[in-house]
C-alpha cells in the first residue's frame, strides 16, 4: 500500500506507475490523479511534445533511437527465448554475452561465412542440446538460419560429412535436379 501525495488515499502499488528516478521506484501520485492531471493539461502537453519533436536534428535522433532500440530488442528476445526453453534458468547465456558474441563474429556465420542479419541469424549449440550441450555462451555461436536447420542435432564432424556426401553424390550420379543448373564439380574438395 502507498499513499497518494495528491488525493491522500492509500492504494495498492498496482494503482501507481513505475518511476526509476524515484527512491522507492514509484510515482508519488496515483494513476487516477495522474490521469486527471493529464486530461486537464492535454492540449498544452501535446503542443509541447510536438514542438520538442520539431527541434532541429530531432528527426535523426528519434530515428537513431528506434534503430538502436530494435537492435537491443533482438539480443534481448534471443536471450529470452533461450531462457524460456532452458530447464535451469541460471545456466543460460545472458543478453550481454550474446551481443558480445555477435561483435566477436563481426556478424558473419561461422560455418557458412554468410552475412547475418536480424532476420536470418540463429543461435546454434556447438554440442547439440540433445547430446548434453548447455545453454552457456561457450556452447553457442551465431549461424545462418539454413545452416542451423540442416545441422539440427548433428555434431560438426557429422554435419560436414553430410555436406560432403550430398555434394559428392550429386556430382557423381548427376541425378540431382540442381546439378543441371549449377556446376557442382567446382565446389568439391579434391582429395587425391
Ligand atoms: Zn491520488
Image (spheres, rainbow, N blue to C red):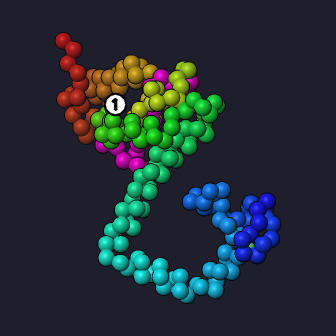
Residue 99 vertical placement versus 137 (above, below)? below
Q: Is residue 122 a member of the stretch shown in magenta?
A: yes
Q: Which residue is mark 1?
A: 111
Q: Residues within 10 Å of mark 1 (few under 14, many from 20)?
A: some
Q: Is residue 168 a member of the stretch shown in magenta?
A: no
Who is closer to the viewer here, 138 or 114?
A: 138
Q: Tell me where residue 109 sits by quadrant.
A: top left
Secondary structure beneath disc 1?
A: loop
- Judge left or right: residue 36 versus residue 79: right
Residue 1 vertical placement versus 34 (above, below)? above
Residue at horizontal 23%, vertical 21%? 189
Q: Is mark 1 within 8 Å of ligand 1?
A: no
Res. 112 in view? yes
- Residue 186 point in image, percent of width and height: 19, 29
- Residue 165 point in image, percent of width and height: 35, 22
Q: Residue furthest top?
A: 192
Residue at horizontal 42%, vertical 78%? 52
- Residue 88 point in image, percent of width and height: 63, 30
- Judge left or right: residue 20 versus residue 149: right
Q: Tell me where residue 176 sits by quadrant.
A: top left
Residue at horizontal 39%, vertical 59%? 67
- Residue 126 point in image, percent of width and height: 44, 25
Residue 16 vertical placement versus 36 (above, below)? above
Q: Tell me where residue 178 sits by quadrant.
A: top left
Q: Quadrant of ligand 1?
A: bottom right
Who is closer to the viewer here, 54 or 139?
A: 54
The quadrant in which the C terminus is found is top left
The quadrant in which the N terminus is found is bottom right
Q: How many marks?
A: 1
Q: Which residues are magenta?
A: 114-130
Res. 145 in view? no
Residue at horizontal 29%, vertical 35%? 113
Amino acid at each position: 500500500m502507498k499513499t497518494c501525495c495528491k488525493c491522500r488515499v492509500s492504494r495498492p502499488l498496482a494503482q501507481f506507475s513505475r518511476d526509476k528516478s524515484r527512491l522507492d521506484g514509484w510515482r508519488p501520485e496515483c494513476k487516477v490523479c495522474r490521469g486527471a492531471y493529464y486530461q486537464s493539461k492535454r492540449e498544452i502537453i501535446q503542443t509541447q511534445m510536438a514542438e520538442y519533436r520539431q527541434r532541429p536534428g530531432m528527426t535523426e535522433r528519434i530515428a537513431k533511437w528506434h534503430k538502436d532500440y530494435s537492435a537491443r530488442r533482438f539480443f534481448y528476445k534471443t536471450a529470452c527465448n533461450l531462457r524460456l526453453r532452458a530447464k535451469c534458468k541460471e545456466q543460460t547465456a545472458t543478453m550481454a554475452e550474446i551481443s558480445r558474441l555477435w561483435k566477436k563474429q563481426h556478424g558473419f556465420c561461422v560455418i557458412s561465412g554468410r552475412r547475418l542479419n536480424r532476420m536470418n541469424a540463429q543461435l546454434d549449440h556447438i554440442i547439440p542440446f540433445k547430446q548434453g550441450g548447455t545453454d552457456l555462451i561457450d556452447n553457442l555461436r551465431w549461424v545462418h538460419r539454413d545452416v542451423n536447420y540442416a545441422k539440427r542435432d548433428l555434431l560438426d564432424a557429422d554435419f560436414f560429412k553430410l555436406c560432403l556426401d550430398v555434394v559428392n553424390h550429386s556430382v557423381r550420379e548427376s541425378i540431382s535436379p540442381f546439378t543441371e543448373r549449377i556446376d557442382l564439380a567446382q565446389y568439391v574438395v579434391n582429395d587425391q
